[in-house]
Image (tube, rainbow, N blue to C red):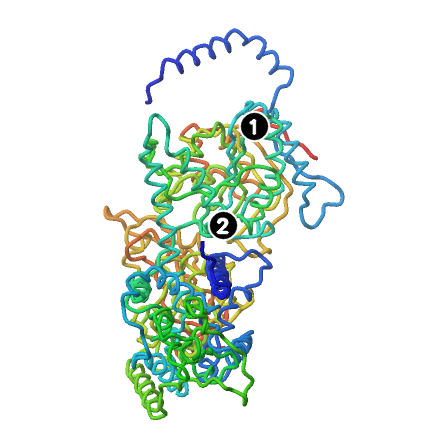
Amino acid sequence: MKKKTRRQFIFETGLYAGALALQPVIGRAQDVQAPLDMVVCKWKGDPIPEEPTREIADKLTKKAIEAIGGLERFVKKGDVVWIKPNIAWDRTPEQAANTNPDLLRTLIELCFNAGAKTVKVGDNPCHDSKKTYITSGIGAVVKEAGAELVYVDRSRFKETEINGERLKKIPLYPEMIESDIILNVPIAKHHGEATVTLGMKNYMGVVENRRMFHQDLPTCIKDITAYMKPKITILDAIRVLTANGPTGGDLKDVKRLNIVAASVDIVALDTFGCEILNYDPNKIGTVKKGFEAGLGQMDYKNKLKYQEILV
Amino acid sequence: MKFKKPRSLMQWIRRLSQIIFFVLFICLAWELHFLEEGESPESYKIFFHLDPLIFLLTFLSTWTIAGLSFLCLITVVATLLLGRVFCGWFCPFGAYHTFFSWLARKRNRKKESQSRTPAHRVKYFILFAMLGMSLFGGHWFGIFDPFSFFYRALSTSVFPAFHIAIEDTSNAIYNEDPKIFGFHLTSITEPIYQQFRTHISKISQKTFYTEGTIIAFTLILITGLNFVRPRFWCRYICPLGGFLGILSLKPILRLSNDENTCTNCRLCSKACPAGAQPEQRGNWLPTECFVCWDCIATCKSNSLSFQFQLPGKTKIKTGKIDYPRRTVLTAMATGIVGLLGFRVVPQAKQGQPFPDTLIRPPGSRVEREFLQHCIQCGACMRACPTNAIQPAGIEAGWEALWTPKLVPKIGYCLYSCNICGQVCPTQAIQPLSLEEKQKTKIGLATFDKSRCIPYSYGRECAVCEEHCPLSPKAIHLVEREVILRDGKITKIRQPEVDPNLCIGCGICEWSCVFQDRAAIRVTPANESRNSKNQPILTFEQDYYPTDSSNSSGSPYSF
């Protein structure tokens, strides 16, 4: 463990003391607002349009974030926020291989409203990042919303000790790790080897040399997730890819569910993701591993403050 | 103070024109790497379209005309009227040599004035050898064409070297983080580098080219020769210069040398970068002259000037071209013999898929036709977003030297990209629509089951399956029982390739965990362009009979 400087120590001690002193106040505030641990927003608009529109993505995201306590709960004033969507493949938004760009636009706005100083959006794509960012529609949206689009620089990854079960030392991207908060924004997709790719699997995009992880995908993903300590995960299930994932490509495999879910518990969110993709979460290696390692709950309906909202 | 003579004004206009076209050439080459949607690739080929020799030789060897290549008529007409203004005013490679000749001016000034030498014939020799070759359906013109030469050198060596220099320097500073009086150097270098990465560099990764070093060497050699003679390449080697020289035998614009004022000081002869003999009255060589105005600018007695003379009323006599007809025949014969030399190797056997690493970009013509079109310019190599297209060495035969091939170990063919065919100036790689390209097979992936992890090591791994861009995927997983070392039986999902679907894009080989030799490799087998290299018969779905009573019918229902 890194040694604390004196200044840091005093600062943190003060912080905890302050928190203790204010505990009754905060506790009461929690009682009043009672932000949820997990929320699922589903579009019930009538009639539901053939293709999910910008309005649907926008409203679902806003409602989900509002119900979980607003981004102010996670993003402090002056924070550097890194939004980590899934932008792995050179595919269009309709093909549902990358996170919905409209959802990201709203999320960036919310970050700025919550007082974020800088919002960075970036992934370590499998395909060439310049092309992927354009085809996915995310590059344009990020620039439009005033956030910073980061082309991850493969020569800047730094070997970092994470001391996991399988992974001891992996190359992580310093700029991402050093940001104040990472918003994990995965898309729900089918995945050939892991069956599904959701929140935990999305953390594969923060590392390099990830090819050999596939020899024990669940444990490796659990290790990275445990290191990343997710504070909030927002699942894009507006369009989901039900087969031939993670790349997809055939529009026949895309289902339009019009769902956005948000949770402070990544395992719970992934369990929900499995259910909407019609898989038994008990058979999904990553979810089971995550639960066993104590990263979260699988029984989200009973153990978490959970709510389904129709928008 | 002495004012410059107004005659040197033309010299400066020429320099400006050279700089403009040089910068334009470099920018177009640099910008080619990544085209935004809706951006037309035609403007990037403009220099190649203006090259009449590319037009002529690909026409002679294939009897086809590609794209807008008839634009070269502009060059032809300009040369017929004004002489080799193309070389002096327009050609970016000429501008490059002009610059290095200027650097070498001190060294060259000591030398005696230069008249024409037999070495001037070399360019005509190369020209006619190429013509002879192309009449018999082949050419090696791309090696000598100035645009191809320069473009190839830029895209496969100069630009990558530039990128490496910038990235490695800033990485070194970033990692070391040196401080000067407590001031971090990175606070200057990092913003600059980030700007470079996001705005100037068209590539997110460094690029590497297999023959890059040799191509760089050719450029360095040609550059260095400017120190032997000014514009060495232009006056002795460039076959395009030779072709334009022949066209400018009787130009309208002629150099006049006033015998009343000329003092025979021979300064003009020393200034001439072409050896065009401006000092020899009546023996000025329009076939060599670049119309660069250097001689006029040096002349102290104002004896020299360019004058328009209508055909038939010419008073100014010119020197004749030093290339007898008999030598033309010798050169053409040499070219034909050279072509035969190219054709004695197994690679030249039609339809022969040799070597097994020769994967051509999607849309490439049949090998023979491909070589007749390709001018080895390297535009596809520059444009390829994944660095997959590499210059071939001599493994594909000397005839195919520096032609494009795909090396999946370095990069893969991106499923949603068809840029190589779009940018090819001669349509050696045909422009395919994205739908066509996604159905074009360039090869077939095959597993090396002795290396593949689920086959030999009893562990899961499906990186190739994950990356396969087709839908349904050409690589699919089959669950099989595997006996482990301790005798335990476990179920492992093993990947298989469906030959009906696989298009040979190579992303599986690129993404394989084995970095040295991938456990799944792509060979050109099944490539659409070569019917002789399709070993696998395509079957309908009902080839595999599930019920034995149904097996009476012929399985070969295709």
Q: Which one is in front, B547 or A230? A: A230
User: Residue B449 sits in which quadrant?
Assistant: bottom left
In the image, residue B31 sits, relative to residue A303, either above or below, namely below
- The extreme top residue here reads A21
Identify the mark nearer the N-term, 2 or 1. 1
Looking at the picture, how far across and down is residue A203, in whole percent? 45, 38
Q: Position of residue A307 (x, y in %)?
A: 63, 28
Against A258, residue B534 (above or below) is below
The amino acid beneath tag 2 is Lys
Which chain is mark 1 on?
A
Compared across the picture, whether B49 is left or right of B351 comes to right
Give the chain of mark 2.
A
Q: Would you say B48 lies left or right of B182 here?
A: right
In front of the other: B131 or A72: B131
Name the residue: 37% across, 30% down: B184
Residue A115 lies, with reference to residue B191, above or below; the image says above
Q: How far apart are the two marked residues, 2 and 1, measured between alpha carbons?
A: 26 Å
In the rendered structure, find residue B237 and report the number of the disc placed on it: none
Q: Residues within 10 Å of mark 2 (few under 14, many from 20)?
A: some
Question: In the rendered view, would you say B136 is above or below A293?
Answer: below
SS state under label 2 = helix
The disc at residue A130 is 2
Label 1: which residue? Answer: A116
Number of numbered discs on residues = 2
Tell me whether circle 2 and circle 1 mark residues in contact (CB < 8 Å).
no
